Image: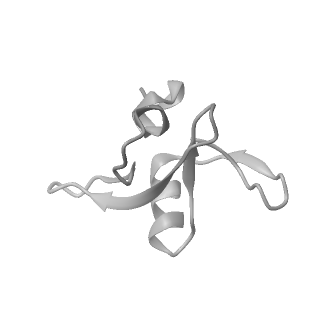
Amino acid sequence: MNWLDEADQKSGTSSREEMYNFVKDGGEAYVKDAAGNKAKLIARTTDTGTKYVKTVADDVKSDNLLKIKECS
């Protein structure tokens, strides 16, 4: 997953598990669509132990994590 820290404009790439750990450890991350809508990421684990992040449900479909090309 590519990311951008809007506070200092630093960017990088993190694996799914690295992003999971960042969010799980208290970091805040969002998916932002072209219109500027943001959806917060939360850390989750499947029943089989796979760690992943997902967006908090809202009424805006374009900020869905699965809409991001690299995640689909």
| Residue at (45% x, 29% y) in the render | 67
- x and y percent of residue 58 in the render? 37, 48
What residue occupies the far left of the structure in this picture? Answer: 47
In this orientation, which residue lies closer to the viewer: 60 or 32? 60
Q: How many marks?
A: 0
Quarter of the image for the C terminus: give it: top left
Relative horizontal placement of residue 28, taking residue 50 as reference (left or right): right
Relative horizontal placement of residue 10, taking residue 57 as reference (left or right): right
| Residue at (16% x, 54% y) in the render | 48
In this orientation, which residue lies closer to the viewer: 71 or 18? 71
Above or below, comparing residue 40 to residue 62 in the picture = below
What residue occupies the far right of the structure in this picture? Answer: 8
What residue occupies the far bottom of the structure in this picture? Answer: 26
In this orientation, which residue lies closer to the viewer: 53 or 16? 53
- x and y percent of residue 24 in the render? 44, 70
Relative horizontal placement of residue 56, taking residue 11 as reference (left or right): left
Q: How is the image coloured?
A: one colour
Quarter assignment of residue 6: bottom right
In this orientation, which residue lies closer to the viewer: 55 or 26? 55
Quarter of the image for the N terminus: give it: top right
- x and y percent of residue 40 in the render? 48, 56
- x and y percent of residue 44 in the render? 31, 60
| Residue at (59% x, 48% y) in the render | 14
Relative horizontal placement of residue 44, taking residue 15 as reference (left or right): left
